[in-house]
Amino acid sequence: MLTDHIEFAGRWGQFKALGKTDPKLEQLIAQSGHELTFGLNYYFNQHFFKIQADAGLRWGKWSDPRDHVARLQIDAMF
């Protein structure tokens, strides 16, 4: 938490095969085996009402623009 209302989040992911496995899975790992995401959340009323935004990308041997993602979500509980 940066303040009482603002939270910064980050995530790193990496796919790895342990030993010999399905060739299609090995190809998927080579194509998009790394992931990086950053997010920012604003809490109006703790977790009862908040806005969340994040952006991320996956990459590997062959990068593809479709591997870029951005999301915006409003979460309200009553």
Image (cartoon, rainbow, N blue to C red):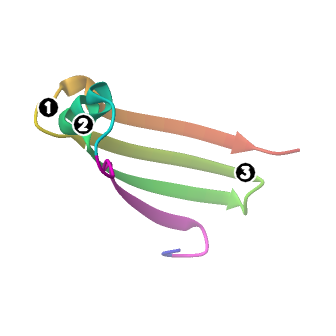
Q: Which residues are magenta?
A: 3-19
- Along the polypeptide, which appears first: circle 1 or circle 3? 3
Based on the picture, tell me whether residue 71 belongs to the magenta stretch.
no
Q: Residue at x 33, y 38 (%)?
A: 21
Which one is in front in this view, the residue at disc 3 or the one at disc 2?
A: 2
Q: Amino acid at mark 1?
A: Ser
Q: Amino acid at mark 3?
A: Phe
Rendered image quadrant of residue 64: top left
**Label 2: few (<14), some (14–19) or many (≥20) C-alpha neighbours in 10 Å:** some
Q: Could you tell me residue 12's position as x and y percent?
A: 34, 58
Q: Could you tell me residue 69's position as x and y percent?
A: 35, 33
Q: Residue at x 26, y 23 (%)?
A: 66
Q: Which mark is residue 44?
A: none
SS for dot 1: loop
Which residue does the numbered mark 3 point to in the structure image?
49
Which residue does the numbered mark 1 point to in the structure image?
63
Q: Residue at x 53, y 56 (%)?
A: 41
- Along the polypeptide, which appears first: circle 2 or circle 1? 2
Which residue does the numbered mark 2 point to in the structure image?
32
Distance Cα–Cα, label 3 vs label 2: 34 Å
Name the one closer to the observer, 58 or 54.
Answer: 58
Residue 38 located left or right of residue 43: left
